[in-house]
Image (cartoon, grey):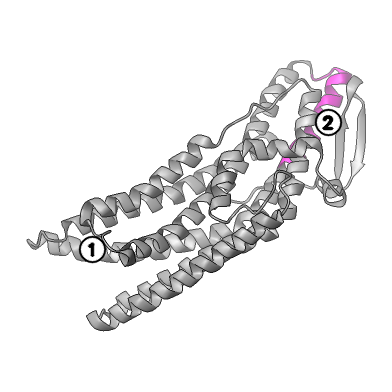
Amino acid sequence: MEVPAVSSGRQISCRSGDKIKVNSGPPCHRASSSRGMSPKGSELFDEMRPVLVASRALGVAPWGRDLRISLPLALYSAAFMVANLSLGGYIGVQMNMLNSIFSLSLFSLVLERFQALVVVATIVVSVTMCFLNGGKLACLAESMSRVDARLSAFGLVARRRSCLPLTLGRLLLLVSLPVVGFAGFHTYSSFKTITVEYICFVPLAVANMVQVQFITLLSLVTSRVLLLTRHLKKLSACRSHPATVHKLEAMASVHSSLIAICEIVQSMFSPQILIVLSSIFIITTANLYHVIDKTVKFLSGQKDDVNVLLIISYRIFVRSYEVWALIASAVDASTKVVMLYF
């Protein structure tokens, strides 16, 4: 999921009359040294508004409109993490008492402990990285604004792409998991069972919103790369014209800036994606163990566990889709950026 590293030490800005100005330093150097965001810095917030609103509710977007850390949102994120970890610890104690009563096998206990650790790691890493990524996201927004300004100098305007369908789709997919469980078991009749389902649902929701943030940012970069590619094809017919040469140099600088933005996105989300993929692998392994066990019983004539088999199979399908969406988005962005570079 890595993109090629291309030096962006020299930035070329295209102004009226096709004049070229060379600026030293990486694309986000001036953003990190400035005290505030430029007026266009909030445009990235507007493009990501749906996923950021949902992420705020889950404690993984403690950023204001300028995409810097907001104290009220930061306090909410910290309180959200502590509250859910405390509730998860209480549920873990209760489940441990049940395990001692029903005498589960060693393999089942090991898988359960791993799943509990993954749940804790998912919430802690996701929320912690949100605090650490505040400065990087503001830097990314500033770089994206400068890229859009350079594109507009060529008469190119990046079309706004709403992430609302992706955000709603993920939320509906997540809600379908407890709904399917309820349809199969009708067990949500007590506060304890509802609490258990909630504490299992929260890490999935947190992980999915982090994934949607990652996919949305890659999509925004990809849309600008495609816009640049289409314009380069139009310029290829008159490549020998001096003005065209200047434009190609400036557009090469824009492309370097887009690669630098991809590197920022990668550095922001690498730990979270690693945790997400690890959790999917561990939990899917546990679910496959139960699927095999229930399938063997079903084939031997025991029909009682058919609902369990269908529900677990559906969960495996949902988690597999998450892996596919992550890999497909990363490969698509990397392919388009590399093709333009070469």
Q: Dot 2: few (<14), some (14–19), or many (≥20) neighbours within 10 Å? A: some
Q: Residue furthest left?
A: 301
Q: What residue did someone put label 1 on? A: 292
Q: Secondary structure at mark 2?
A: helix
Q: Nearer the viewer, residue 98 or 121?
A: 98
Image: magenta residue range: 239-258
Q: What residue did someone put label 2 on? A: 249
Residue 161 x, y percent position in the rendering: 59, 31
The quarter holding residue 20 reads top right
Q: Secondary structure at mark 1?
A: helix
Please check the rendered image and state whether residue 254 is part of the magenta-colored stretch, yes or no: yes
- 55 left or right, relative to 71: left
Report the amino acid beneath label 2. Glu
Q: Which residue is drawn at the image coordinates 50% and 69% (left, top)?
A: 85
Q: Which residue is drawn at the image coordinates 36% and 73% (left, top)?
A: 112
- 18 left or right, relative to 258: right
Residue 241: numbered disc:
none
Query: Do callouts 1 and 2 mark residues in contact (Cβ within 8 Å)?
Result: no
Mark 1 or 2, nearer chain start? 2
Residue 155 x, y percent position in the rendering: 76, 20
Report the amino acid beneath label 1. Ile
